[in-house]
Amino acid sequence: MNHIVLFEPQIPANTGNIARTCAATNSPLHLIEPLGFSTDDKHLKRAGLDYWHDVNITYHKNLEAFLASIGESPLHLVTKFARNTYSDVSFDNGVDHYFIFGKETTGLPESFMRKNEEKCIRIPMNDEHVRSLNLSNTVALVVYEALRQQGFPNLETVHIYENDKLS
Ligand SMILES: C[S@@+](CC[C@H](N)C(=O)[O-])C[C@H]1O[C@@H](n2cnc3c(N)ncnc32)[C@H](O)[C@@H]1O
């Protein structure tokens, strides 16, 4: 199982996109507080967070509480400040992998990344013009790489387009 963990997300539309990816890939979503938006029904609807109720969401009071909850499960820090490329790391099947992503303005805390340098993975990009990729895009890239390596478990429904109809 691939768990998506957002550290203090700020922009509801990003978290909405990510919730949709989580719903489509059967990935539990973890939100580390404080959040930059309200998750009551009225606000979710206004922000277009349509898939919220189809996702298994866990809230954590802070980073320490989240870390205490996962024990020795594999943790991957997704950040551009990393030596390892995400697609070079093995995300083996049958294990709970936790992928933690940083907040939109400031990313992951520096001290946390320094302490876990060997667990940091990056997505290659040209940073001459762009400081970083969009948060929701990075979640999609990483979770689909993990799923590719794992053989897309429980996601292999094939739809064929025939006579103007999907079957
Ligand atoms: C908008 S970025 C944060 C920008 C922040 N100034 C920084 O450089 O970390 C939000 C999150 O997206 C992810 N991200 C963005 N670009 C990335 C890249 N090239 N490789 C890995 N993660 C990336 C990271 O999890 C990051 O914390």
Image: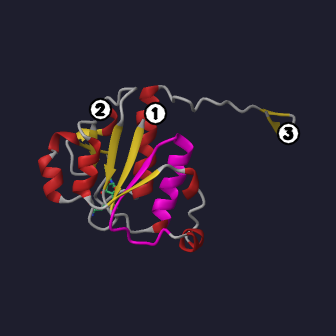
Q: Quadrant of the N terminus?
A: top left
- CB contact under 8 Å: marks 3 and 1: no
Identify the residue under disc 1.
147
* Residue type of the residue flagged with mark 1: Leu
Q: How is the image coloured?
A: secondary structure
Dot 2 falls on a residue whose secondary structure is: loop
Query: Label 3 vs label 1: CA separation?
Result: 31 Å
Mark 2 vs 3, N-terminal side: 2
Earlier-in-chain disc, 2 versus 1: 2
Residue 16 shows up from this direction: yes
Queried whether the magenta region covers residue 85, the answer comes back as no
Disc 2: CA contacts within 10 A as few (<14), some (14-19) or many (>=20)? some
Q: CA distance from mark 2 to mark 1?
A: 13 Å
* Highlighted magenta segment, given as a residue range: 13-39
> Above or below — where is 63 with respect to 75?
below
Give coordinates of residue 33: x percent, y percent.
Answer: 33, 64
Tell me which residue sits at (39%, 26%) in the image. 94
Q: Tag 2: residue type?
A: Val
The residue lying toward the viewer, choosing from 59 and 45, is 59
Note whether 2 is above or below 149 in the view shown: below
**Mark carried by residue 164:** 3
Residue positioned 34% across, 37% down in the render: 97
Q: Is residue 49 above or below residue 161?
A: below
